[in-house]
Amino acid sequence: MMASPIYRRVVVKVSGEALMGPDAFGIHQPTLERIAADLVAAQALGASVGIVVGGGNIFRGVKVSEQGVPRVTADMMGILATVMNALALETAIERAGAPARTMSALAMPEVCETYERRSALRHLQSGRLVLFAAGTGNPFFTTDTTAVLRAAEIGADAVLKATDVDGVYSADPKTDNNAKRYDRLTHQEAIERRLKVMDATAFALAQENRMPIIVFSIRTKGAIEAVLKGQGRATIVSS
Ligand code: UDP
């Protein structure tokens, strides 16, 4: 018998970097296809799946604003990068066999639908994966905060935060041999210890809404599906 998902509705946060795969920039097609297949497999378990995709593989506002572009303009450029990634992932998901819809926080009707909560819920109920593009639509925010925000809006049970390591560590495990891995953690601990896995705004919003955040590695095939079944290695950040 197929295991049923332990989370009925989730928002999966896929960073821009995750789409780069081994490349230094842009979208690595085989990686995009693997992640799309994983999202479709997760949905096939019976969960409704929303996706927030980042833009860091194409553009990061903070970095560019240090080079002279006003922060607000740079952030809008970053927001546009998330739309490009969402459209690429939407295409890959549909090729992998499931219907998907991109909904943008900023109106661009010639490109995709505009985000509207009730339409998003209808898409999910009709078995479509929904990609939430353009972040929150506001500068000074991140797509991590967007993931928590949309999760709260659509009544998701958890945010699944895909990273390149298997959970939350006390320091960067790639550079610090003494980094300790956590199995469980509270939102408060994540904020107090200034853990880098998400920004403080995202953690604060998650804490206020008692939204669990499951941090896991997207590097292995089937990772999202495994988290949904309550298997696989992950850190659970909850109240
Ligand atoms: N961004 C923004 N508001 C939002 C979401 C994103 O201004 O609500 C901009 C910001 O400049 C950010 C960029 O879009 O640097 C890409 O998003 P993010 O850094 O969250 O992407 P990721 O790190 O997940 O690839």
Image: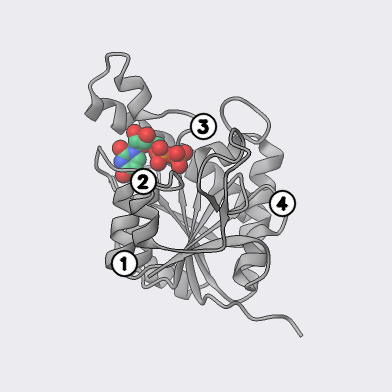
Q: Secondary structure at mark 2?
A: loop
Q: Is residue 35 left or right of residue 55?
A: right
The residue lying furthest to the top in this view is: 68
Task: Locate residue 85 relative to residue 61 in the image: left or right.
Answer: right
At horizontal 60% and vertical 70% (from top left) the residue drawn is: 228
Residue beneath disc 2: 199
Determine the quadrant in which ligand 1 lies.
top left
| Of the pair 145 and 173, the residue shown nearer to us | 173
Mark 2–mark 1 CB contact (< 8 Å): no
Label 4: which residue? Answer: 220
Tell me the distance, in whole angstroms, between the alpha carbons under discs 3 and 4.
19 Å
In the picture, which quadrant includes the N terminus? Answer: bottom right
Q: Secondary structure at mark 3?
A: loop
| Residue 161: % across, % down | 50, 55
What residue is drawn where x is 63% and y is 38%? Answer: 177
Of badges 4 and 1, nearer the viewer stands 4
Q: Earlier in the sequence, mark 4 or mark 2?
A: 2
Q: Which mark identifies residue 153?
A: 1
Residue 79 seen by the camera: no
What is the number of the mark on residue 22? Answer: none
Q: Which residue is mark 3?
A: 57
Locate residue 159, reporting x and y percent. Answer: 46, 62
Q: Residue at x 37, y 61 (%)?
A: 187
| Mark 1 element type | helix
The alpha-carbon separation of the residues under discs 2 and 1 comes to 19 Å
Asked whether residue 87 is in view, the answer is yes
Cα–Cα gap, marks 4 and 2: 24 Å
Give above or below for 156 relative to 139. Answer: below
Figure colour scheme: one colour
Element at badge 4?
Answer: loop
> Residue 13: x and y, percent?
48, 53
Lateral position of residue 22 relative to residue 237, left or right: right
